[in-house]
Image (cartoon, rainbow, N blue to C red):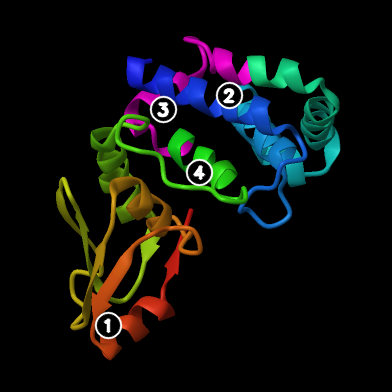
Amino acid sequence: MSPTHLDEREALAASFFALGPAAPTILPGWDARELMVHLLLRERHSALVPGLRMPGPYGARARAVEGELRAADWETLVERLREGPGRLSPLGAVDRLSGLAEQLIHHEDLRRAQDGWEPRGPDAVSQEDAWRAVRLMAPLTLRVPVRVLLVSPLGGARVGSRTADASVRVHGEPVDLLLWATGRERVARVRVHGDDAGRRALAAGGRGL
């Protein structure tokens, strides 16, 4: 992984450790432990993830591993996250291709659920990497019948429907645009500009994976 990946992973692990397993997240029904279990299942046991809702031995094995993670010591889980998926894991390659998207998103899922949170400054997160993550993720997560121009201090990106008549512009810092594009508008500090038709079309669509 690149140094930036390692920096963000370390920052996420530090936040998990400092806040503890019962800390809230912005994800409905998920505390910090649920978010940690999700991340570790994805990174270390990705082949079992589809089995969590399936019957039979495959499903039983997946749920057993999930239960082991839920019951594990918090410090142990933090260290596993800090170590990463490992070079032999297929998720190692995915992480390199997807940039910091998942780490950034889930770190903010945790951070922005805490009282008094403030955005991290440019010295704490790579805006260039966040902007690359926006351009990678937004075409996959925005399912809206409207043309959308995402505007950041680093440039613009056109996403959404290419054939729609209506259009909107969404302005914000790269991390906030990433959160907005993945359905986290409640905590994303963005500004949406557009006429009534554009706003209605935006509201009629969906965001998120």
Q: Which quadrant of the view contains residue 41?
A: top right
The residues tagged by marks 3 and 1 sit, at their Cα atoms, a distance apart of: 34 Å
Q: Nearer the viewer, mark 3 or mark 2?
A: 2
Q: Is residue 90 magenta?
A: yes
Reply above or below: 156 against 149.
above
Image location (x, y in percent) of residue 191: 30, 68
For label 2, the SS is helix
Whether residue 47 can be seen here: no
Whichever of callouts 3 and 2 sits on the residue coming sooner in the sequence is 2
Q: Which residue lies furthest to the top in this view?
A: 87
Q: How crowded is mark 1: few (under 14 residues within 10 Å), some or many (20 or more)?
A: many
Q: Is residue 143 magenta?
A: no
The residues tagged by marks 3 and 2 sit, at their Cα atoms, a distance apart of: 20 Å
The residues tagged by marks 3 and 4 sit, at their Cα atoms, a distance apart of: 20 Å
Amino acid at circle 4: Glu
Residue 198's label in the rendered image is 1
Query: Which residue is at 66% across, 20% downward?
Result: 78
Residue bearing mark 2: 13
Whether residue 69 can be seen here: yes
Q: In this view, does 97 lie to the left or right of 8?
A: left
Residue bearing mark 4: 108
Amino acid at circle 2: Ala
Residue bearing mark 3: 94
Read off the magenta span.
80-102
Reply above or below: 54 against 66.
below
Whichever of callouts 3 and 1 sits on the residue coming sooner in the sequence is 3
For label 3, the SS is helix
User: Would you say the residues marked 3 and 2 are in contact, meaning their CB atoms lie under 8 Å apart?
Assistant: no
Image location (x, y in percent) of residue 56: 84, 38
Amino acid at circle 3: Val
Amino acid at circle 1: Gly
Image location (x, y in percent) of residue 128: 23, 35
